[in-house]
Image (tube, rainbow, N blue to C red):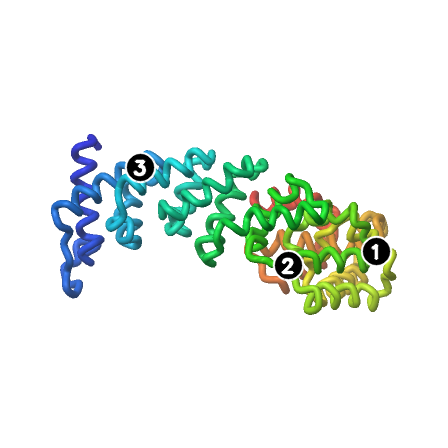
Amino acid sequence: MRPRLQLLAFRQTGRRCFSGRVGGDSSGPNPRFLSPSQDGKLASLANLFQRYGLSPSQSPDFLAKNRFLLDASLHDTERSLSILSSLKIPNELVVSVMGRCPGVLEHEFLRKWEVVFREFGFLGVSPAGIISTLQFSRKFNVGPERFGSLFKVLKGLGVRDYTYCRILEEFPGVIAMGESEISGKVKFLEGIGIPKAAVDGVFRTFPGILGLSVEGRLKPLILEFRHLGFDKSVARDEILTEPRVLGMELGELSRCLELLRTLKCRETIKEKILRGGEFKAGFEVKLRLDCLCRHGLIRRDAFKVLWKEPRLIVYQIGRLRGRLISC
């Protein structure tokens, strides 16, 4: 379609979206037509968003759902997109965040965050980490002033810059946490035998630990490990090797071990499954259950699949995922 015809088609679609007559339906109550100035701005916004990857077919619906963009200065909206570009956010992520959290495009909000990111020299924060942080900040109204103070708190606890970046990517909610909450996680880890020097590695591998309650989740989980016959040293060693075990739900390891103990398979397969010990095998079962569930199975059926096909437990996750995709 030639540019002129494309623009006319967009204007017509945009008018229907904003008047409540999408798809040619004229029965909508109190239809509201755009003024000539709004009509022109609608086309200008569409052209602007198209430069950043939003297709002409997506623009009318997007703008209809986010009327604040029509009221905002076109210049400010363009500057907001320019800020995201200067932060090295690829267009596909810009389009994604526009759909999930369009409020991120508010210029004053972005300008404040840009100042903070530049002040800290980005710290190597990935585009995904920046977007996650912006979304959380906007959604929960947490200002950028928390970024610097939080960085100092984590730095004081021995957390490296790269780990801070990983935390922002995986658990942006950290910017809303207080110093006592964060130090409480460090005290918990030290209390179960994790050396302070290893805390950075735990946070880097499993940033989600920062969002878990010490009293309501982490301590009961350690107690469960002991009830299952794993003493403090075994639990500590497993956590140091694979910190993500701390993300298991209460009772989850018990169910995974029960499956392992009821497996009916060749001895060679069972030896491969258990060669790293029962604790590690239980966690490997959990990872494969998660993989199966991400591909559409409910938990109960995922257990049945592993019970019937124990060989899947020794498959690498990538290989298992490949088999599921090819099915």
Locate residue 71 relative to residue 106 in the image: left or right. Answer: left
Q: Helix, strand or loop at disc 2? A: helix
What amino acid type is highlighted by mark number 2?
Ala
Helix, strand or loop under label 3:
helix
Q: How far apart are marks 3 and 2 (CA)?
A: 42 Å
Residue at position x 20%, y 47% from top? 13
Look at mark 2 in the image and give the residue it sits on. Answer: 302
Judge the density around disc 2: few (<14), some (14-19), many (≥20) Cα neighbours within 10 Å: some
- Would residue 180 be seen by someone viewing this image from the given angle? yes
* Among numbered discs 1 and 2, the one appearing first in the sequence: 1
Q: Single out the residue that lies furthest toward the left.
A: 36
The residue indicated by pointer 3 is 50
Q: Can residue 266 be seen in this snapshot? A: no
Q: State left or right for residue 112 relative to residue 39.
A: right
Between the C-alphas of marks 3 and 1, the distance is: 54 Å
Query: Residue at coordinates 29% horizontally, 37% vertically from top-left?
Result: 48
